[in-house]
C-alpha cells in the first residue's frame, strides 16, 4: 500500500505513471485543500478537482487544471456584465464579517463572483455547483469528494486533507493575499514575506488520512510550501510521517523549480529554494528522488533519475525510481 500527498500539478503528473509500480487498489491520494476558495458562493477545490478530472479521463493536460475542451461562457459573461455595469475587476474579498459567516468550510477565503478572477469552465462549474450543494445538504467535504470520485470512476482512494477550513494566505509587500489571489491574479509577482496556513491548528485530518499515513508515503514533486505545507500543518500529520517510510520527489532541477512559485515560497519560509532545501521542508523523509544532474546531497539516501515529466513514460520512470528508493529504506 502507498499513499501520495498531492497538490498543484506536480504530483498529478507523477500519478500518470503510478501503475508502473503500484496498482490502483493499493494507492491512496491525499489532496491539499489549502488552495480551496469560495468564489461567487461556489466552493472550489482545485487540487481535488485536478485528481477527479485526471481519474475521469477528462483533464486538460495542456494546463493541468480544468476540463479538456471546456467552454467559458459564464466566466466571459460575468466579465461582460461587470464591465457594462462599471463594477470592479480582479479579486475582491467579501467583507471581513462575511469571511466567517455561513459555510464554515469556506472561512477566510471568500471572494465575490463579480468579474470572476479565476477562469472556470462551464462543465468545471457544474462540479463546483454539485459539491457546494452537497455541502449545503450536510455532507462533509470528504463525503462529497467520495461521491464525486465515484461519479468520475476513480479507481484510487482520494481523500481531501481535512473537512475543516485551512486557508493558505501569503503575506506580501502588497498586503495579505490568499494563495489563489497571489498566484492567479498577481501571477506570483509580489514579494513574499511569509506564508500562513490559517485554521490549521484547529483543523483535523479528514477521516482516513492518518490511517493512510501508516502506509509508505510518497511526496510528489509539488510545491513544498503551499501544496504540501498545509497538510504538514495539520495536527498529527508530521508526527505520523516521522513514524512511517517517506520518499520525497524533488520539484526542482537544482535551483530551478519545474513550475510555479516554489522557489520564492521556500525562501520565504527560510528553506533553501532548491533541491537541497527539501531536507528542511521534509525533515522526516527517509529517501529522496532527485534529478540525475542535481548536485544536492542529503544524509538520507537519494536515488537519481531524469525527473522531468512530460509524458506517461516519464512519469513511469520516476515511479520506478521511487520504488527503488522505497526498497532501499523500507
Image (cartoon, rainbow, N blue to C red):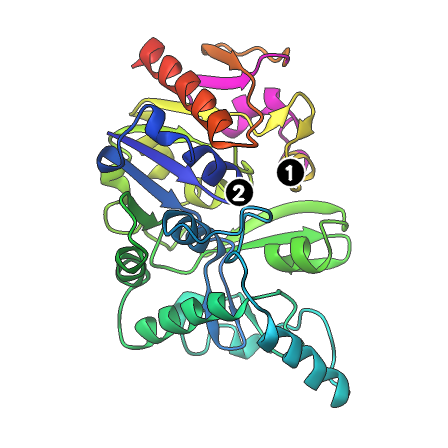
Assess whether mark 1 and mark 2 are in contact (beta carbons under 8 angstroms). Answer: yes
- Residue at 35% x, 38% y is 237
- Is residue 259 at least partly visible in the picture? yes
x and y percentages locating residue 276 in the rendered image? 60, 19
Image quarter where the C terminus lies is top left
Give x and y (percent) for residue 78: 64, 80
Residue at 57% across / 10% down in the picture?
297
Q: Which residue lies furthest to the front in this view?
A: 69
Q: Which of marks 2 and 1 is nearer the N terminus?
A: 2
Q: Residue 309: where, in percent of width, then height?
A: 55, 29
Tag 2 secondary structure: loop
Residue 285 covered by magenta stretch: yes
Q: Can residue 283 be seen in this view?
A: no
Q: Residue at x 29, y 39 (%)?
A: 28
Q: Camera-side residue: 323 or 270?
A: 323
Q: In this view, does 179 lie above or below 218?
A: below
Q: Quadrant of residue 267?
A: top right
Crowding at dot 1, Cα within 10 Å, few <14 / some 14-19 / many 20+, comes out as: some
- Disc 1 marks which residue? 259
The label number, if any, that marks residue 9 in the structure image: 2
Residue 76 in magenta? no
Mark 2 closeness class: few <14, some 14–19, many ≥20 residues within 10 Å = many
Q: In this view, does 61 lie to the left or right of 264?
A: left
Instruction: Magenta stretch: give its range.
Output: 267-293
Query: 48 or 247: which is nearer to us?
Result: 48
Please state the horizontal and vertical placement of residue 47, each as a whole percent of the image: 47, 51
- Indicate the secondary structure of the residue bearing disc 1: loop
CA gap, disc 2 and disc 1: 9 Å
Q: Is residue 143 left or right of residue 268?
A: left
Q: Is residue 62 above or below residue 218?
A: below
Amino acid at each position: 500500500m502507498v499513499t501520495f500527498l498531492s497538490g498543484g500539478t506536480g504530483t498529478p503528473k507523477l500519478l500518470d505513471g503510478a501503475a508502473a509500480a503500484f496498482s490502483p487498489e493499493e494507492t491512496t491520494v491525499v489532496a491539499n485543500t489549502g488552495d480551496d476558495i469560495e468564489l461567487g458562493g461556489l466552493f472550489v477545490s482545485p487540487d481535488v478537482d485536478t485528481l477527479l478530472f485526471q481519474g475521469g479521463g477528462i483533464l486538460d493536460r495542456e494546463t493541468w487544471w480544468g476540463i479538456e475542451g471546456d467552454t467559458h461562457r459564464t466566466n466571459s459573461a460575468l466579465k461582460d456584465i461587470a464591465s457594462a455595469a462599471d463594477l470592479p475587476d480582479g479579486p475582491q474579498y467579501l467583507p471581513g464579517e462575511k469571511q466567517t459567516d455561513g459555510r464554515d468550510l469556506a472561512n477566510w477565503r471568500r471572494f465575490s463572483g463579480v468579474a470572476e478572477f479565476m477562469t472556470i469552465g462551464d462543465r468545471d462549474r457544474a462540479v463546483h455547483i454539485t459539491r457546494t450543494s452537497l455541502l449545503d445538504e450536510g455532507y462533509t467535504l470528504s463525503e462529497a469528494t467520495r461521491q464525486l470520485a465515484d461519479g468520475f470512476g476513480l479507481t484510487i482512494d482520494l481523500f481531501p486533507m481535512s473537512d475543516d477550513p485551512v486557508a493558505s494566505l501569503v503575506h506580501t509587500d502588497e498586503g495579505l493575499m490568499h494563495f489563489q489571489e497571489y498566484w492567479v491574479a498577481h501571477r506570483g509577482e509580489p514579494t513574499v514575506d511569509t506564508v500562513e496556513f490559517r485554521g490549521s491548528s484547529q483543523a483535523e485530518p479528514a477521516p482516513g488520512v492518518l490511517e493512510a499515513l501508516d502506509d509508505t508515503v510518497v511526496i510528489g514533486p509539488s510545491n513544498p510550501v503551499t501544496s504540501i505545507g498545509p497538510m504538514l500543518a495539520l495536527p498529527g500529520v508530521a508526527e505520523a510521517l516521522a513514524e512511517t517510510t517517506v520518499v520525497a520527489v524533488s520539484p526542482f532541477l537544482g535551483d530551478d523549480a519545474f513550475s510555479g512559485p516554489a522557489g520564492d515560497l521556500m525562501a520565504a519560509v527560510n528553506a533553501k529554494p532548491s533541491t537541497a532545501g527539501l531536507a528542511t521542508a521534509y525533515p522526516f523523509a527517509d529517501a529522496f528522488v532527485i534529478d540525475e544532474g542535481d548536485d544536492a546531497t542529503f544524509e538520507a539516501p537519494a536515488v537519481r533519475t531524469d525527473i522531468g515529466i512530460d509524458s506517461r513514460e516519464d512519469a513511469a520512470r520516476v515511479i520506478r525510481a521511487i520504488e527503488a528508493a522505497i526498497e532501499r529504506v523500507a
